[in-house]
Amino acid sequence: MPEITPNAPRLRPARLEDLDVVLPWAPDAEAMRMWAGPTIGFPVARQQFWENLHHVTGEAFVLCAAARDEIVGFGQVMHREDDFAHLARIIVSPTRRGEGLGRTLCRELLRVAPRFLSVRAFSLYVYPENVRARALYRSLGFVDTREERGFLRMEKPGLDLK
């Protein structure tokens, strides 16, 4: 069982108003494309983004730093295909990058997904040029499977939380 520390960041369901904090982390069209994919334009209205998040079966979450309930990360888990939980739109606050919060966020998303989705494996898409994200996902047990529409699809078999 993982050790629980009182100051550890915690995951909670995202709320519409959280997007006031999160959306500015993608400050231009290229950053928005790298984070949210090619279907989200820039700039994007918070309500429009929120509706886009909820057109699929799944949940959006924020990672909060325990000390001040500061939102430090955002991610989405959705059902995409047979028994796969798909991780999407993973981002960490630019002021908090390099602190291991991306790893914490991903591990928490992997942990909560089986609570609301029938899961036997995980998947995600990442742009091939996003080298740091790819390295993180590989360290969590994801493997490259194929390129699709300019994305690299990565999969993580099983439910272990490496």
Image (tube, rainbow, N blue to C red):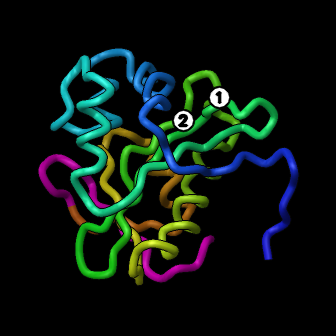
Q: Identify the residue shown where x is 49% and y is 60%.
A: 138
Mark 2, Cα crowd under 10 Å, few <14 / some 14-19 / many 20+, is: many
Residue lying at the far left in this picture: please name it.
149
The alpha-carbon separation of the residues under discs 1 and 2 comes to: 7 Å
- Can residue 132 be seen here? The reply is no
In depth, the one of 128 and 17 nearer the eye is 17
Q: Position of residue 11 (x, y in %)?
A: 62, 51
Q: Is 60 left or right of 126, judged from the image as shown?
A: right
Residue 41 versus residue 102 in the image, above or below = above
Q: Which mark is residue 92?
A: 2
Q: Report if the CB atoms under discs 1 and 2 are less than 8 Å apart.
A: yes
Which residue is disc 1 drawn over? 96
Question: Magenta region: which residues?
Answer: 147-162
In terms of depth relative to the viewer, which is nearer, 35 or 19?
19
Q: Residue at x 81, y 34 (%)?
A: 67
Q: Residues within 10 Å of mark 1 (few under 14, many from 20)?
A: few
**Circle 2: residue type:** Val
> Image quarter for residue 68?
top right
In the picture, the quarter occupied by the C terminus is bottom right
Residue 90: within the magenta?
no
Q: Give the numbered dot on residue 14.
A: none
* Residue 151 picture location, percent across and down: 22, 50
Q: Quadrant of the N terminus?
A: bottom right
Amino acid type assigned to the residue bearing label 1 in the image: Arg
Task: Pinpoint residue 103: horizontal percent, then vertical percent.
Answer: 61, 51
Which residue does the image show at 31% across and 16% down from the upper left? 28
Whether the magenta-drawn stretch holds residue 154 is answered as yes
In which image quadrant can residue 127 be found?
Answer: top left
